Amino acid sequence: MSRRRQKVIITCAVTGAIHTPSMSPHLPITADEIAQAAIEAAQAGAAIVHLHARDPSSGKPSQEVALFRPFVTRIKQASDVVINLTTGGAPTMDVEERLQPALQLQPEVASLNMGSMNFGLYPMLQRYSHFEHDWEEPYLQQSDQRIFKNTFRDIEHILRSCSAHQTRFEIECYDIGHLYTAAHFMERQLLRPPLFIQSVFGILGGIGGHLDHVSQMKLTADRLFGENYVWSVLGAGRQQMPIATLSALLGGNVRVGLEDSLWDGPGTLAVSNARQVQRIRSILEALSIEVASPDEAREMLQLKGRFNVNF
């Protein structure tokens, strides 16, 4: 399907729940670190920052609203970047716990996973032998028996809970079937267009990172949603930049950041989220592709505006 060319939205996923503090000294943990990383990513060209929180003493993923509020407030004061809060949290959390930051803080955008899945982090143990905190190694080890639960009832609960606040969703699709789930909720009018579809590649338990899969995801989304969606892509680990580049060439948007990959190249850790934003921006501009500003992203996604939030 032919689609009108638009500027590319860069989303930066700042810290996430996949990696542990021992994996990189550059992973932001405290509220100050998360805020500074997000502000720097915005200055580098990110229109949206996707945010998780962590316990500042241990680095463990947390959905405590009190941990989110300091950094979202500081980011809003310092930047006009679109703030996107997770409802995914971590696979170890129940849906009510995961929901609270988006429910109480009422951001412009929140992420929402479109299906239950195996979420295998345990292969990372082959690359790390030392952990600073006692929760890190079991967190990875036990992922071989852990299901990331996102049932139809869970998804409906999150959508209905946030509907009055006009929060839009970054619809995270880890496989082709997740696109059909999104279409199901759009048919039920619990999701309204334009959908912001984030296709995720390279997580063990989801669709792989082969370039053919990227094309297949887009063709399926085009068939299901037509002109009623905005498409974005993230690649995990070493697939981050190649898949982001392909997405842009196919007319899509991109997501980078230390949540998705700790690396800046083979064997080289990324020193910041901003560095990854700068890298994909340089690729886009070399391809004569323009980068969207936060306000242009708001227009494309039909967001409620940065001041219509509860922080």
Image (cartoon, rainbow, N blue to C red):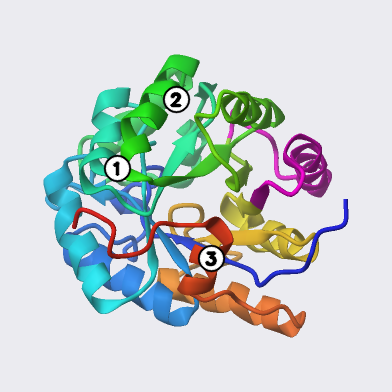
Q: Amino acid at mark 3?
A: Glu
Asked if one can make out residue 271 in the rendered structure from this viewpoint, the answer is no
Q: Nearer the viewer, residue 23 or 287?
A: 287
Considering the numbered disc 1 on the image, is that residue within a helix, a strand or a loop?
Answer: helix
Which residue is denoted by mark 1 in the rendering? Answer: 102
Q: Nearer the viewer, residue 303 or 49?
A: 303
Considering the numbered disc 2 on the image, is that residue within a helix, a strand or a loop?
Answer: helix
Residue 188 position in % (x across, y down): 57, 23
Residue 207 lies in magenta, yes or no?
yes
Q: Considering only order in the chain, which callout, 3 or 2, is on the residue closer to the N terminus? A: 2
Residue 45 lies in magenta, yes or no?
no
Image quarter (top left, top right, bottom left or bottom right) of the C terminus: bottom left
Considering the numbered disc 3 on the image, is that residue within a helix, a strand or a loop?
Answer: helix
Which residue is denoted by mark 2 in the rendering? Answer: 155
Which residue is denoted by mark 3 in the rendering? Answer: 299
Residue 26 position in % (x across, y down): 34, 66
Q: Amino acid at mark 1?
A: Ala
Can you say whether 309 is above or below 169 in the image? below
